[in-house]
Image (cartoon, helix red, strand yellow):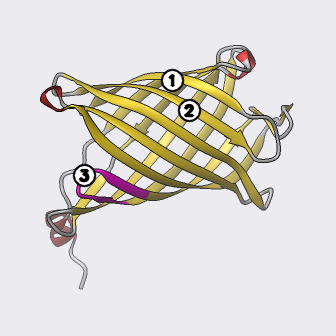
Amino acid sequence: MFSCSLASAAIKKPVARYSVLVNNDLRHADENFIANRLESPFNKELSDKVTARLTPFVEYRYSLRRHKRERVSLGAQAGLELAGFFYAAEELRQVWRSEPVYDRGIIKNTNMTEALSIIKLSFPLIPRKDIKGYISGEYTYDFRAGRGTRIESIAGMLIPVGKSWEANAAWRHRDRIHADDCDTLEAGVTYIF
């Protein structure tokens, strides 16, 4: 028999995270955006070195050039973290968008389902300050199109700011499998509550 009290005792108390990210595309200024993401990760320690994570989320992107909503995503990410430095995850999301994609055409009022595969390695950059570096690879599959659409390589760092804040700075190379590539610089801040 399933018990909600047993389930909540086995899973660490979830926190909520609200992030704001500015994405500056170095090749295509028309693709710069601000993203707002609200998520609530549920963590379960499977052993002293393995943690399972389930993270439901909602994300809203606003185009800085076109001054309009460009993308709204709703979904969940399931992943495993090993020894605090390796993370592998699969994300399934429903997306409503009008962003420039597929040979830089504009898709209006499109909704679709995507899957995102993530592999991430984290390491201490400045251990005494808890500043971490990371490298990550992401692969996006579009179920509507029936094919992969993006492969992304990311390098960045996370900087804790007090107990409830975190800053992020990153470089991202986005390989659009059937269209042109781009490089972006990202900067963001996350409030943890």
Residue marked by disc 1:
186
Percent of width and height locating residue 71? 65, 34
Real-space Cα separation, disc 3 to disc 2, in angstroms: 22 Å
Percent of width and height locating residue 23? 56, 23
Real-space Cα separation, disc 1 to disc 3, in angstroms: 23 Å
Pick whichever of labels 1 and 3 is earlier in the sequence: 3
Pick whichever of labels 3 and 2 is earlier in the sequence: 3
Percent of width and height locating residue 65? 71, 14
Real-space Cα separation, disc 1 to disc 2, in angstroms: 8 Å
Helix or strand or loop: what does disc 2 sit on?
Answer: strand
Q: Give the foreground label among 1 and 2.
A: 2
Residue marked by disc 3:
84
Secondary structure, magenta segment, majority class: strand
Helix or strand or loop: what does disc 3 sit on?
Answer: loop
Helix or strand or loop: what does disc 1 sit on?
Answer: strand
Q: Is residue 81 magenta?
A: yes
Q: Residues within 10 Å of mark 3 (few under 14, many from 20)?
A: few
On the rendered structure, is 156 left or right of 41? right
Pick whichever of labels 1 and 2 is earlier in the sequence: 2
Q: Is residue 139 above or below residue 171?
A: below
Residue marked by disc 2:
172
Number of labels in the image equals 3
Q: Is residue 99 magenta?
A: no
Magenta-colored span: 80-88
On the rendered structure, is 166 left or right of 78? left
User: Which residue is painted at 68% across and 46% down in the image?
Assistant: 150
